[in-house]
Image (spheres, rainbow, N blue to C red):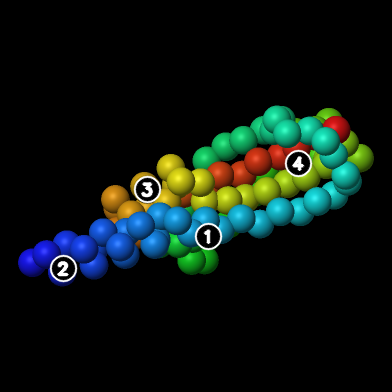
Amino acid sequence: MKKLIMTALMGSALLASGCATQTALIQPTQQVTPTYSDSQTFFISGIGQVQSVDAAQVCNGAANVAKVTTMQSPKDVALALVTFGIYTPRTATVYCQ
């Protein structure tokens, strides 16, 4: 029983430690505070699903977009673990100049 609990704890720690981040650096920026940040809903790891954010609209023009990222934050990973991967949110962030 002890081995099973330790294995489950180690597996949970390993899964919680991995985060996936995609970043599109459009223009160099020093801004560390995002202009827009929102959690997007996906189910079963987002297979066949699409969510979009119009970064040009958020930044009042495409020339003002500095960086766009999507990531699984620790909160997103925790929600995915609790729901056994059925609900797998991701956080989209837009940085403007």
Disc 1, disc 3: CB below 8 Å? no
Apparent side of residue 41 relative to residue 5 in the rendered image (left or right)? right
What's the distance in space between the residues labelled 1 and 4, CA to CA?
19 Å
Q: Return the x and y of residue 54 as percentages of the image width and height.
A: 73, 42
Compared to 88, does 8 lie above or below?
below
Residue 64 seen anywhere in this rendered image of the structure: yes
Q: Earlier in the sequence, mark 2 or mark 4?
A: 2
Residue at image point 71% right, 54% down? 23
What's the distance in space between the residues labelled 2 and 4, CA to CA?
46 Å
Compared to 54, does 51 lie above or below?
below
Apparent side of residue 29 relative to residue 10 in the rendered image (left or right)? right
Q: Return the x and y of residue 26 as percentages of the image width and height.
A: 85, 49
What's the distance in space between the residues labelled 3 and 2, CA to CA?
21 Å
Q: Secondary structure at mark 1?
A: loop
Q: Earlier in the sequence, mark 1 or mark 4?
A: 1
Q: Return the x and y of residue 53 as percentages of the image width and height.
A: 67, 44
**Residue lying farthest to the right in this orientation:** 63
Q: Secondary structure at mark 4?
A: helix
Which amino acid is tagged 1? Gln
Which amino acid is tagged 2? Leu
Q: Earlier in the sequence, mark 3 or mark 2?
A: 2
Q: Secondary structure at mark 3?
A: helix
> Which residue has dot 1 on it?
49
> Which residue has dot 3 on it?
78
> Which residue has dot 4 on it?
55
For discs 1 and 2, the disc positioned in front in the rendered view = 2
Q: Earlier in the sequence, mark 1 or mark 2?
A: 2
> Which residue has dot 2 on it?
4
